[in-house]
Image (spheres, rainbow, N blue to C red):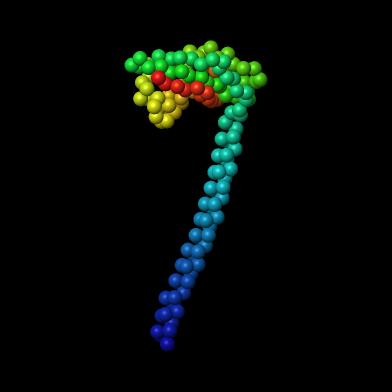
Amino acid sequence: MADEKDTTAVEAPKKSKKMLMIIVAAVLVVLGGGGAGAFFLLRDSTAEAAAPKKGIITAAESTITVNLADAHYLKLGFALQQTEDSGEEAVDLSEAYQLAIDEYTGRTVTELATAEGRAKIKEELLAKLIKAYTEDDVEMVMDIYYTSFVTQ
């Protein structure tokens, strides 16, 4: 009889620990799911608010030829994606031409031969364009598209 009391006494705490662990796990799952849901909902709404909306595209009327290193050349044509906040009027591309010439002059054909190299230089140029075409804290340009890109 003493043996029966000892085994039931030992088994009872195991059941209560299992139940406690199940409850704790369920609470953590519910809290984790709610936290993750709130994170994704808040992140999406702030990303949409921060990202500018696309406006008109202003295409350069002519291509430019830029001197690269080692007597090579780059023939470059581009268009600027304006933001919706910039309005319906096309921006003046004079400064964009100058920034593109400055950015590409003296570069090597090797730098421009890889997709990674072109992407890096494009990011640098885009950052300069956004800065140049920001008036009263309103970004007027959000992207640049190459319509012609030929090296020789």
Q: Determine which quarter of the picture holds residue 43.
A: top right
Outermost bottom residue: 1
Front-lying residue, 134 or 38: 134
Outermost left residue: 70
**How far across and down, in percent of the image, does residue 15 sit?**
47, 71
**How far across and down, in percent of the image, does residue 71 sit?**
35, 14
Residue shown at the point (59%, 16%) measured from the top left: 91
Outermost front residue: 152
Q: Is residue 114 visible?
A: yes
Image-based side of 61 in relation to 88, left or right: left
Residue shown at the point (59%, 20%) measured from the top left: 58
133 to 20, vertically: above or below: above
Front-lying residue, 133 or 46: 133
142 to 26, vertically: above or below: above
Q: Is residue 140 visible?
A: no
Image-based side of 55 in relation to 118, left or right: right
Front-lying residue, 53 or 63: 63
Front-lying residue, 109 or 98: 109
95 to 33, vertically: above or below: above
Residue shown at the point (44%, 75%) measured from the top left: 11
Q: Determine which quarter of the picture holds residue 40.
A: top right
Q: Determine which quarter of the picture holds residue 113.
A: top left
In which quadrant is the N terminus drawn? bottom left
**How far across and down, in percent of the image, does residue 92 sit?**
58, 13
In which quadrant is the C terminus drawn? top left
